[in-house]
Amino acid sequence: MIVVAAVYKFVKLNDCAAMRIPLLMQCDALGITGTLLLAAEGINGTIAGTRTGIDNILAYLRSDPRLADLQHKESTASLPPFYRMKVKLKNEIVTMGVPGIDPTERVGKYVKPADWNALINDPGVLLIDTRNDYEVEVGTFRGALDPRITTFREFPEYVKKHIDPQQKPRIAMFCTGGIRCEKASAYMLQQGFSEVYHLQGGILKYLENVPEADSLWQGECFVFDQRVAVGHGLAPGHYELCYGCSRPITPDAKNSAKYQAGISCPNCYDSLTPEKRAAAMERQKQVTLSTRRGEKHIGRKRKSV
């Protein structure tokens, strides 16, 4: 069984460039795969490996006093969810593109999964899904607003156009693992919203801890690895990934005439250029050949948060 660990922490890492190579070497030595992002504002990513490997890399990270209290969320996978290990340097560990937002200085109020239902059942609370549109399509909380954003950079503009801080709304926000909401809540407080809450540990922690019989979650939760989506108890979901557009597709979508394995789905069929279609067809040919030879194809890049 493969252990999958999602980690993030907003913390000042001004030496993040010097951290990159030693961290990558440790991951490679332990057989860890996945992606970790480093920036001056912190660390973020999802990794996978054996039980021993994950325990050891988390211990390595926490040996840095700044990351001593680094939290992580775990799930399991029967097949490797990542093909390689990458440690990248970024300007932000989750990109909003608004300067001066620092969750280490000011952030919204954390709400534990056990207390989340009571908060969002309050008719006076405005519930906002801060994730991208293709993630929301897979699943969301009952009654949540969908901003219909394609990247997190669009979230500030959505807030400016649709939510007025002068009306003093009570805001509750959620995202996959909690990191977007840390920055989103810091942004909203900066904009003059006075009562801002966010789900501690994100959707993943809620699905892990809240029994399905008591859950207000509808659908599955999109995740950024080869599992594509998970359900209650973090059980593997029913979605697959379209390699033409990196969007999740349902079993029903695979019955469409616009679905071609490894090439296109109803979401992207009409927008694929002849060049992209030819490249996808060649890639799928190589995947098929690798499978016949019993080899592992490295796949293609996934969308990032």
Image (tube, helix red, strand yellow):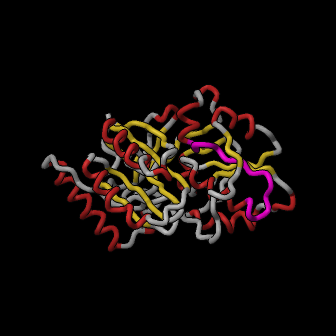
Question: In the picture, residue 76 is in which quadrant?
Answer: top left
| Residue 196 forms part of the magenta stretch | yes
Q: Residue at x 82, y 61 (%)?
A: 165
91 horizontally vs 149: left or right: left
Q: Residue furthest left?
A: 293
- Please state the extent of the stretch shown in magenta in the rendering: 189-203
x and y percent of residue 68 in the render? 48, 46
Q: Residue at x 26, y 56 (%)?
A: 298
Residue 39 seen in render: yes
Q: Nearer the viewer, residue 156 or 138?
A: 156
Quarter holding the N terminus is top left
**Relative to 238, residue 64 above or below:** below
x and y percent of residue 88 in the render? 39, 63
Question: In the picture, residue 151 is in which quadrant?
Answer: bottom right
x and y percent of residue 79 in the render? 31, 40
**Relative to 4, residue 209 above or below:** above
Question: In the picture, residue 186 is in which quadrant?
Answer: bottom right
301 horizontally vs 13: left or right: left
137 horizontally vs 284: left or right: right
**Relative to 231, residue 181 above or below:** below
96 horizontally vs 237: left or right: right
Q: Nearer the viewer, residue 15 or 212?
A: 15
Instruction: State the count of labels.
Output: 0
